[in-house]
Structure formats: structure tokens, C-alpha cells
Image (spheres, rainbow, N blue to C red):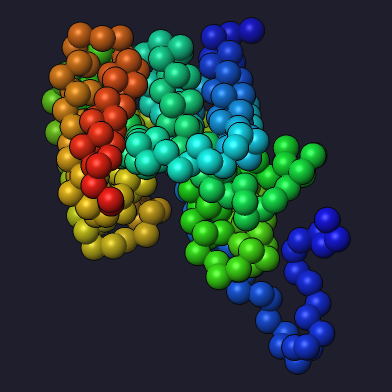
């Protein structure tokens, strides 16, 4: 690959000093969303993970919803196995994202190992919104770099902050996790009737089975609502 | 190694492998409409389930915690007003904290 990505000089438009739009948009998106790592850091420490474990999750798992899910299951007293299984199941959508992105990014070898980590809701959304392949690649990389750095710095700050203020409950830290999930699915719930029915179905399955199953298991079972929704709309050309 | 560390590392490895898999396996899998629709809907079902369980669950039992529910109601109001992510979080945590300070829940 001849170009190393990032910002390139554009000879035909030498008078234009601005950063290319996908790069600028990606950097801003990463900063804005990455700050919410504060909420994860606080929620994870509130759930009983230590600061190092919290930071390792942000560095290595690097996928917000799964990280909140693991912390939430631990906070609820669930088994660690159920917590990991639920978190990994939540991360399965990233496979679909990277399937979509494979054709756009066209990376091989070691670069693939690095860029794979950058596949998130945000980088995917920004890359797919670009008009051409080069912009998509630049936007993806900018979002990845900006979001990765901000998310991890914010996680550390949130984890240290939460550890120094005593009882998590009195500061409402136990509400951060569910409020964050709600904010994350809000745009999807607004997307259509099927999404709202699947959301309601998932919630109903989880509440109904909470007294019967070990904590964490009801979350995994809720995937049945997604399967039902997929079958129900599978024939329609939606 | 403690159980929490194993959970952290297993989760990390699993999440990374899932991202890498999509860059590696053939793209034609995506043409399966059912699979694609399922993948679109999985986050909705799982995250809604998490919201519900964390709203009314505690250690495998159903509980009624007015401060927690009021915090989530504040989040809904903030979302309806199209508030940014952090404002939603602060509204939720702040409402629960203030109510508990006032002796509710």
C-alpha cells in the first residue's frame, strides 16, 4: 500500500488549509464519545473491579456496551462466566461491522491486527457515511485514534474519581450503567416498530427470568427477542 | 489469578476476536439477510434487557428502588430533549443521588 493513511497533501488545492472533513469529523466524534469513558470508569469501580482491571478492559476489549455489561453483571452479583458471555455476545455486532468495513479498509497483515481493534459503533458509522473509499479509511482511522485515546484517558479518570468518593450508591453511580445503555439504544428504538418490539421483548424476557436464573443469564436469553425479530422481518424487504 | 481478572481477559480476548473475524471471513456471509437482521437487532434486545434488569433487579431478585427508577426516568426525559450522552448520564446519577440525599430509597 503506497499511502500510509492520515492527512495527505493535496497539490490541486494547496490554498485550502483545512483538515480533510472525514478526519476532522472523526477526531471530534472520538473526543465527544470518548469522554463517556468517565462513566464507564466510575461504573466499573463501583461494581467492584479495581482500577487496573477497569483500565485493561478499556485498553483491550475497547467496546463500550460490552464493558458496561460485564461491570453490570458483576455489580448485580452475577457469575463471572455469565458476565463474560453476555459481554462477548454484545460484542458480536462488531463482527458484522468489520465484515462491512473489510471491503472499504482493504488491509492486510499486521495492519489488520491493529485496525480490527478500532471497529466500534462510532468508527463504523463515520466510515460508512463517507462518499468514497479514501475518505472512509481516513475517517475510520481518525475516529479510532481519537476515540481510543480519549476513551482510555477518561476511563482512568473515572475509575480514580469513583474510588476516591466512597459509597457509589450515594452518588447515583449504580444508575450510570442503565442510563448509558438507554442512551446507546435510544436511536435504534427510534428507528422503527420492530426495534421497539424487540427492545420491549428483551426487557420482558430478562425481567421474567431474573428470579429464576443466575444473574447474567437473563441478558443472554434476551437475544431470543432479536432472533424472533429477525425471523419476523426476514421475509419483508426491510 | 482472581476470577475478576479471568473475566476481564476472557472478555477482552473474545471482543477482539469478534472484531478481527469480520475482517477475515468472506464478505458474502453478510448477504445472508437473516444473519444481518439478527446482528442489527441483538444490541437492541440485550441493551434493553440490561436496562430492565438493572432498573428492578438486585442479586437475582426483583426490587423496587424509587431513587434508581427516578434516575432512569430523568435519563428518559433528557433523551426526549435530545440531550448529549454525558448530560443524560449526569441527569440520571444526579437525580438518584439527590433523592437518596433526601432520604428516598
The extreme bottom residue here reads A15
Residue at image location 25% in from the left, 42% down from the top: A235
Residue at image location 21% in from the left, 58% down from the top: B80
Residue A7 as seen in the image, left or right of residue A90: right
Q: Position of residue A132 (x, y in %)?
A: 60, 68
Q: Quadrant of the N terminus of chain A?
A: bottom right
Q: Residue A15 versus residue B24: which sits nearer the camera?
A: B24
* Total numbered labels: 0
Residue A194 as seen in the image, left or right of residue B94: left
**The quarter of the displayed image where residue A6 is located:** bottom right
Residue A26 as seen in the image, left or right of residue A84: right
Confirm whether residue A35 shows in the render. no
**The quarter of the displayed image where residue B99 is located:** top left
Up/down of A28 relative to A190, above or below: below
Q: Position of residue A214 (x, y in %)?
A: 30, 9
Residue at image location 38% in from the left, 26% down from the top: A72
Residue at image location 19% in from the left, 24% down from the top: A205
Residue A103 as seen in the image, left or right of residue B70: right
The extreme right residue here reads A2
Up/down of B88 relative to A50, above or below: below
Q: Position of residue A105 (x, y in %)?
A: 66, 53
Q: Residue A65 versus residue A135: which sits nearer the camera?
A: A135
Confirm whether residue A213 shows in the render. yes
Amino acid at each position: 500500500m503506497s499511502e500510509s493513511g492520515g492527512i495527505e497533501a493535496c497539490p490541486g488545492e494547496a490554498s485550502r488549509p483545512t483538515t480533510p472533513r472525514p478526519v476532522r469529523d472523526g477526531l471530534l466524534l472520538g473526543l465527544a464519545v470518548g469522554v463517556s469513558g468517565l462513566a464507564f470508569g466510575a461504573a466499573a469501580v463501583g461494581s467492584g473491579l479495581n482500577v487496573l482491571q477497569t483500565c485493561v478492559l478499556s485498553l483491550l476489549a475497547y467496546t463500550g456496551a460490552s464493558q458496561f455489561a460485564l461491570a453490570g453483571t458483576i455489580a448485580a452479583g452475577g457469575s463471572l462466566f455469565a458476565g463474560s458471555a453476555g459481554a462477548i455476545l454484545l460484542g458480536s455486532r462488531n463482527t458484522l461491522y468489520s465484515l462491512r468495513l473489510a471491503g472499504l479498509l482493504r488491509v492486510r497483515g499486521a495492519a489488520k491486527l491493529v485496525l480490527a481493534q478500532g471497529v466500534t459503533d462510532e468508527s463504523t458509522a463515520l466510515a460508512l457515511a463517507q462518499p468514497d473509499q479514501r475518505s472512509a479509511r481516513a475517517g475510520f482511522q481518525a475516529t479510532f485514534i481519537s476515540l481510543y485515546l480519549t476513551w482510555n484517558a477518561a476511563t482512568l479518570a473515572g475509575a480514580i474519581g469513583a474510588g476516591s468518593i466512597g459509597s457509589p450508591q450515594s452518588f447515583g453511580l449504580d444508575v450510570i450503567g442503565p442510563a448509558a445503555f438507554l442512551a446507546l439504544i435510544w436511536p435504534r428504538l427510534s428507528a422503527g416498530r420492530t426495534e421497539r418490539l424487540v427492545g420491549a421483548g428483551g426487557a420482558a424476557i430478562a425481567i421474567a427470568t431474573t428470579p429464576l436464573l443466575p444473574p447474567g443469564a437473563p441478558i443472554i436469553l434476551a437475544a431470543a427477542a432479536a432472533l424472533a425479530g429477525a425471523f419476523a422481518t426476514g421475509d419483508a424487504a426491510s | 489469578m482472581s476470577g475478576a481478572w479471568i473475566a476481564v481477559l476472557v472478555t477482552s480476548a473474545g471482543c477482539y476476536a469478534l472484531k478481527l473475524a469480520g475482517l477475515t471471513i468472506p464478505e458474502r456471509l453478510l448477504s445472508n439477510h437473516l444473519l444481518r437482521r439478527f446482528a442489527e437487532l441483538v444490541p437492541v434486545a440485550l441493551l434493553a434487557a440490561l436496562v430492565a434488569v438493572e432498573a428492578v433487579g438486585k442479586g437475582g431478585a426483583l426490587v423496587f428502588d424509587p431513587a434508581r427508577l427516578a434516575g432512569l426516568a430523568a435519563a428518559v426525559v433528557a433523551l426526549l430533549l435530545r440531550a448529549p450522552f454525558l448530560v443524560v448520564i449526569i441527569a440520571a446519577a444526579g437525580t438518584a443521588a439527590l433523592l437518596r440525599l433526601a432520604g428516598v430509597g
